[in-house]
Amino acid sequence: MKSKISILFLLFAFVSFAASAQSADTAKEKEVWIPSKSIAVAEYYKGGQEAMYQFIDKQIKYPALARKNRVQGECIISFTLNEDGSTSGFKVLKNAGAGTGEEAMRIAKLLKFKAPGPGFGMVASVPIMFKL
């Protein structure tokens, strides 16, 4: 009798786990990770920080070598936002390796910003250096 009850309990637990996993997969919408700390360059991106991270999420192609070797980490790209909204001077400051830095730079070059405009009481704006 005990074995029948334990088998019934295990069967019930398995069925409930399978049902919850199916409902979680169908209702799950892809979420884009957005850091809690605001990034200065995001204020010049059309749509703001959330739009910028959604664009990055759509464009990123994780390098095959990094996926194969399970490379994870942070890549920091430095670039200059010019007076007209164009970008230049891209450099990889921090690289996780296995092609992740090159992919981060490729994505950073795809980002389109609006012109910063005059600042600090000046008539014309000056180039602004950012790290992303």
Image (cartoon, rainbow, N blue to C red):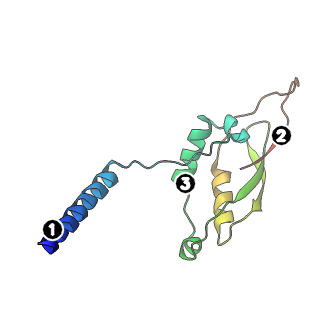
Please give the residue where the numbered disc 3 appears in the rendered image.
59
Query: What residue is drawn where x is 54% and y is 52%?
Result: 57
- Relative horizontal placement of residue 29, taking residue 106 as reference (left or right): left
Mark 3 touches mark 2? (CB < 8 Å): no
How many neighbours does mark 2 have within 10 angstroms: few (below 14), some (14-19), or many (20 or more)?
some
State the image coordinates of residue 29 (x, y, percent, origin top left).
40, 47
* Mark with earlier residue (2, 1): 1
Depicted 44 relative to depicted 24: above or below: above
Residue at horizontal 65 percent and vertical 43 percent from the top: 112
Residue at the disc numbered 2:
127
Q: Disc 2 and disc 1: Cα gap in Å?
A: 73 Å
Residue 33 versus residue 127: which sits nearer the camera?
Answer: 33
Q: Amino acid at mark 1?
A: Ile
In the rendered structure, the answer to whether residue 79 lies left or right of residue 98 reads right
Q: CA distance from mark 3 to mark 1?
A: 52 Å
* Kind of residue indicated by mark 3: Gln
Label 3: how many Cα within 10 Å (few below 14, some 14–19, many 20+): few
* Residue 5, numbered label: 1
